[in-house]
């Protein structure tokens, strides 16, 4: 059995990759994908930690919730991206400064 | 018929709900839908509500008498057969309103929405609904062309409802609800034509002057709750004796502070105390003077004439202003315990009667004369009740309701006719423009005349009997009702017996003046030549001018008022019928209580006295009427009253009929200063303006200044500057870029993560006294603790420590009191193995130890 610490280490790497991608990439679609990566990193960590607590399935249950919420979030996010694209003819985040007004 | 009465028991007398409910229904319907209903429907609603209420009231009164008769017990006292009646009440409990509870042994006092009728409130109820109906009928025509017709009747019905609450309420708080309700309606109706500034101001004045009185009433309520432990009439009566207990009201100085400086005289060594009874009655008197327009709060009533005339008749003559006298009669068993206050009541009454009568002598406005006359007559009622003769005072309430309502309505009829000719509000009330109306308005003339006869005390009219009774009672009264020894032990002021004689003289003088000014008003209005031909606008300006508001008929326009045109005309039937009925009551109403006839012909009983006997039984038992019906004394007093009538009216006849007003002008010329003072109403309004009102104004100005400098100037400026500064700073951050926001979020999350990743050695010291301490470390994520030099970290987060004091050494005092200290080092390690330490300093002070021992 592979030690859970490997999974947790992988999850940490994925989380920081996602975070960096979200912060530094300018494409909205990539940002969304980065968020997905971060969420999945969390999922991985949850499942891995669940292996340490064999008497319950809380971590795995929570994973399903996260997946469901992530799906909903992507649906909303894509809708925003589409309407943003209609207005600006672009999907670059540095042009997304309409929140100001 | 008996079976009919026994349908309702005395405790569950639900017809009262009809008496009360109909005017409320009328007010509600007219108030909510009146505008859309149209005049006919509004009229039908208001009049039928009043009529049904009146019939229910009649039934109630008949049932009351039935219950009284069936409760009569025949007894033989000293060989005479005496029929004794209980104080029978018909009551109806609507619901329990609330429970008043408080400190100081005051157990919960239930305050119920309960209404009850006895003879006193029953007669008031009949007056309110009966005269109320007549005045509604009159107003249905008088207000015909007013655009606020529905509003007027909604207010008027609401007034009747409130007045009935006041009269029928079975406890003081409920009376207060009605008291405020009539005040509100009075305000609304005085300012009925609110688009005119003086009217609105008059309404406000009435409201504010009444607030002063209400303050007194509220204080009285608190005191009664404290002393009697009850607020309903029966409970107050039962607990009234504790009002004379040695537990007195500390009036001055406030608190127990001691001060001997320059203003030491403000703080007497012996505090000013008064008995509970005196305090309660003084407060009630303040309330009564406000509502019943007595000195010093009468100023609102003359101004209240700005309202429509039916309002003046109903509210400011017949019903509302007598509420103060009703209150005194209702709480007669409290007032007899404070003869000092009673003497003040009688004095206020006598003085007001005289004072207002002098002002009425010179007024030219017909309604103003009647207004001052009302103030004066209310003074007579105060004189009556203050002299301990509640029956006499209340009888005058009754007769005054008849003749003054009649006078006001007749005056309204005159004004109505004048207005149709003159189209000017002020001139149509000015008696100098009238004269000779006898010829044009025979019915109004006759009824006004009959009511005038009653008010000036023409023999055998109602006013003659009631005023005569008051004057006689005032003369024969001695104010010695409270046991002398008791009064002395409580240091009560007992008014001297000669006060009654002085009041009698003042009363006779006031009656003389009354006869004079009423005859003057009557002669100026109805005799001589009509002087209204020459007033009015020139031909060119005639038409719809701005003064011409819509309340009186537009069908009476005359193109040229400078030449004889259409004559003033008699009012239509809905206005004259109430006049005739009221005039008949004014003339024959005296038969209800002809005190003189009783003594002359040795009558067994007279109706009003017979009805009211059980109501005033408690106070009569105090020996208030111990004065024998001394026939010669009574005849002498009657002679005084009669001569007052004869001199006053004879002088008026001589002045205004025989000499056509010439002597009046001579007198005015002979004493110009006095005449000017009278015309200026003794400058009382100016006095109030200069003192109380300007003081309040000054206070308001001060606060306005403070508001402008402190609130608007400093506080508002500082806050707005702060908000602007923060806004400028944060505006730089809010640039609308999504990734900047995301970065800020990451920084925040990183900060939190750092905080949670690092251990924090925090904790607190619990001082248990006597050198025992506990050092308790704050919990955290995966924390392990180590205290001082312990080898290992452990899960225990607390450590008890004991500090010993050094051995007692009496020779070294400094050492004995020096504090002992000890350091405890706490080390915390979290899951990541990072450590943090903190040193706690424990201090034990011997002095503090002693304190804590003392406490334990």
Image (cartoon, rainbow, N blue to C red):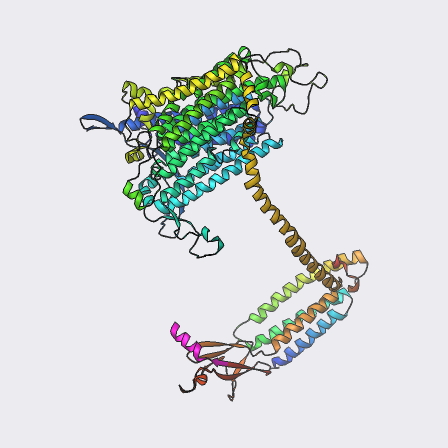
Residue at 43% x, 24% y: name it: B511
In this rendering, does residue B164 appear at all? Answer: no
Q: Classify B161 as above or below B641.
A: below
Q: Quadrant for residue B720, please give it.
A: bottom right
Instruction: State the image coordinates of residue B456 (x, y, percent, origin top left).
Output: 44, 20
In this view, the residue farthest toward the front is B670
Q: Nearer the viewer, residue A5 or B518?
A: B518
In this view, the residue farthest toward the left is B79
B369 left or right of B751 in image: left
Q: Is residue B810 magenta?
A: no
| Boundaries of the magenta span | B842-856
Instruction: State the image coordinates of residue B538 (x, y, percent, origin top left).
Output: 70, 17
Q: Classify B659 as above or below B143.
A: above
Q: Classify B484 as above or below B60.
A: below
In this view, the residue farthest toward the right is A89
What type of secondary structure mainly makes up the magenta span? helix
Instruction: State the image coordinates of residue A72 (x, y, percent, origin top left).
Output: 66, 61
B479 left or right of B82 in image: right
Q: Is residue B849 magenta?
A: yes
Q: Nearer the viewer, residue B710 or B545?
A: B710
Q: Classify B529 as above or below B757.
A: above
Residue at 59% x, 43% y: name it: B697
For the C terminus of chain B, the quadrant is: bottom left
In this rendering, does residue B281 appear at all? Answer: yes
Q: Nearer the viewer, residue B806 or A95?
A: B806
Residue at 60% x, 49% y: name it: B703
Q: Quadrant for residue B748, please give it.
A: bottom right
For the N terminus of chain B, the quadrant is: top left
Q: Nearer the viewer, residue B137 or B270?
A: B270
B813 left or right of B786 in image: left
Instruction: State the image coordinates of residue A51 (x, y, percent, origin top left).
Output: 57, 76
């Amino acid at each position: 059995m592979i030690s859970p610490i490997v999974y947790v280490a992988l999850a940490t790497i994925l989380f920081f990759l996602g975070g960096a991608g979200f912060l530094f990439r300018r494409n909205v679609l990539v940002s969304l994908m980065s968020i997905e990566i971060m969420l999945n990193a969390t999922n991985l960590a949850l499942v891995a930690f669940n292996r340490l607590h064999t008497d319950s399935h809380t971590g795995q249950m929570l994973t399903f919730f996260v997946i469901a919420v992530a799906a909903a979030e992507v649906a909303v996010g894509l809708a925003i991206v589409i309407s943003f694209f209609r207005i600006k003819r672009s999907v670059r985040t540095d042009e997304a400064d309409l929140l100001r007004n | 018929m008996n079976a009919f009465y026994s349908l309702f028991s005395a405790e569950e007398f639900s017809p009262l709900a009809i008496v009360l409910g109909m005017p409320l229904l009328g007010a509600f319907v007219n108030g909510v839908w009146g505008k859309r209903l149209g005049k006919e429907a509004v009229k039908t609603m208001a009049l039928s509500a009043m009529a049904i209420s009146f019939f229910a009231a009649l039934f109630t009164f008949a049932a009351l008498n039935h219950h009284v008769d069936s409760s009569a017990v025949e007894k033989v006292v000293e060989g005479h057969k005496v029929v004794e009646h209980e104080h029978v009440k018909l009551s109806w409990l609507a619901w329990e309103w609330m429970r008043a509870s408080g400190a100081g042994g005051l157990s919960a006092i239930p305050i119920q929405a309960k209404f009850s009728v006895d003879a006193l409130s029953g007669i008031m109820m009949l007056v309110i609904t009966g005269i109320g109906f007549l005045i509604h009928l009159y107003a249905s025509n008088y207000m015909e062309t007013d655009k606020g017709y529905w509003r007027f009747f909604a207010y008027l019905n609401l007034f009747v409802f409130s007045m009935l609450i006041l009269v029928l309420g079975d406890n003081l708080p409920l009376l207060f609800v009605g008291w405020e309700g009539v005040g509100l309606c009075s305000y609304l109706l005085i300012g009925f034509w609110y688009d005119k500034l003086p009217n609105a101001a008059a309404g406000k004045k009435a409201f504010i002057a009444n607030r002063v009185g209400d303050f007194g009433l509220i204080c009285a309520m608190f005191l009664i709750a404290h002393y009697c432990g009850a607020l309903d009439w029966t409970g107050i009566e039962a607990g009234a004796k504790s009002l004379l207990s040695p537990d007195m009201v500390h009036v001055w100085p406030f608190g127990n502070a001691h001060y001997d400086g320059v203003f030491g005289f403000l703080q007497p060594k012996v505090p000013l105390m008064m008995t509970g009874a005196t305090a309660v009655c003084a407060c009630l008197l303040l309330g009564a003077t406000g509502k019943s327009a007595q000195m010093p709060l009468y100023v609102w009533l003359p101004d209240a004439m700005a309202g429509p005339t039916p309002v003046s008749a109903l509210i400011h003559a017949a019903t509302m202003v007598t509420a103060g006298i009703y209150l005194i009669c209702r709480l007669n068993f409290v007032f007899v315990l404070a003869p000092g206050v009673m003497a003040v009541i009688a004095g206020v009454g006598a003085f007001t009667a005289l004072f207002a009568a002098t002002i009425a002598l010179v007024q030219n406005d017909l309604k103003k004369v009647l207004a001052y006359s009302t103030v004066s007559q209310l003074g007579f009622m105060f004189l009556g009740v203050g002299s301990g003769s509640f029956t006499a005072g209340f009888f005058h309430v009754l007769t005054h309701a008849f003749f003054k309502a009649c006078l006001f309505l007749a005056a309204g009829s005159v004004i109505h006719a004048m207005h149709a000719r003159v189209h000017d509000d002020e001139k149509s009330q000015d008696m100098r423009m009238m004269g000779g109306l006898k010829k044009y308005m025979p019915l109004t003339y006759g009824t006004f005349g009959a009511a005038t006869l009653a008010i000036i005390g023409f023999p055998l009219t109602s006013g003659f009997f009631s005023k005569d009774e008051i004057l006689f009672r005032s003369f024969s009264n001695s104010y010695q009702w409270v046991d002398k020894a008791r009064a002395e032990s409580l240091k009560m002021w007992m008014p001297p017996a000669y006060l009654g004689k002085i009041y009698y003289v003042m009363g006779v003088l006031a009656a003389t003046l009354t006869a004079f000014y009423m005859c003057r008003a009557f002669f100026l209005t109805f005799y001589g030549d009509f002087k209204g031909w020459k007033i009015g606008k020139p031909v060119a300006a005639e038409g719809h001018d701005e003064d011409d508001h819509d309340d009186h008929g537009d069908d009476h326009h005359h193109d040229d008022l400078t030449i004889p045109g259409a004559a003033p005309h008699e009012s239509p039937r809905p206005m004259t019928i109430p006049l005739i009925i009221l005039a008949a009551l004014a003339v024959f109403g005296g038969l209800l209580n002809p005190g003189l006839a009783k003594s002359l012909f040795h009558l067994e009983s007279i109706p009003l006295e017979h009805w009211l006997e059980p109501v005033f039984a408690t106070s009569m038992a105090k020996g208030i009427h111990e004065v024998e019906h001394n026939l010669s004394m009574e005849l002498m007093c009657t002679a005084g009253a009669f001569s007052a009538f004869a001199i006053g009216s004879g002088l008026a006849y001589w002045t205004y009929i025989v000499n056509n007003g010439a002597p009046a002008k001579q007198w005015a010329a002979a004493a110009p200063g006095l005449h000017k003072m009278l015309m200026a109403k003794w400058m009382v309004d100016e006095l109030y303006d200069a003192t109380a009102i300007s003081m309040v104004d000054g206070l308001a100005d001060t606060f306005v200044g403070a508001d402008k400098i402190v609130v608007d100037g400093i506080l508002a400026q500082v806050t707005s500057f702060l908000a602007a500064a923060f806004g400028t700073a944060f505006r730089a951050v809010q640039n609308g870029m999504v990734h900047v926001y995301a970065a800020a979020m990451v920084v925040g999350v990183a900060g939190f993560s750092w905080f949670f990743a690092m251990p924090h050695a925090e904790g607190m010291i619990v001082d248990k006294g006597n050198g025992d301490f506990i050092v308790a470390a704050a919990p955290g994520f995966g924390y392990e603790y180590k205290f001082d030099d312990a080898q290992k970290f452990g899960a225990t987060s607390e450590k008890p420590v004991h500090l010993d004091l050094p051995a007692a050494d009496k020779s070294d005092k400094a050492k004995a009191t020096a504090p002992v200290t000890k350091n405890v080092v706490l080390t915390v390690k979290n899951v990541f193995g990072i450590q943090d330490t903190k040193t706690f300093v424990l201090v034990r002070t011997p002095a503090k130890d002693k304190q804590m021992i003392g406490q334990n």
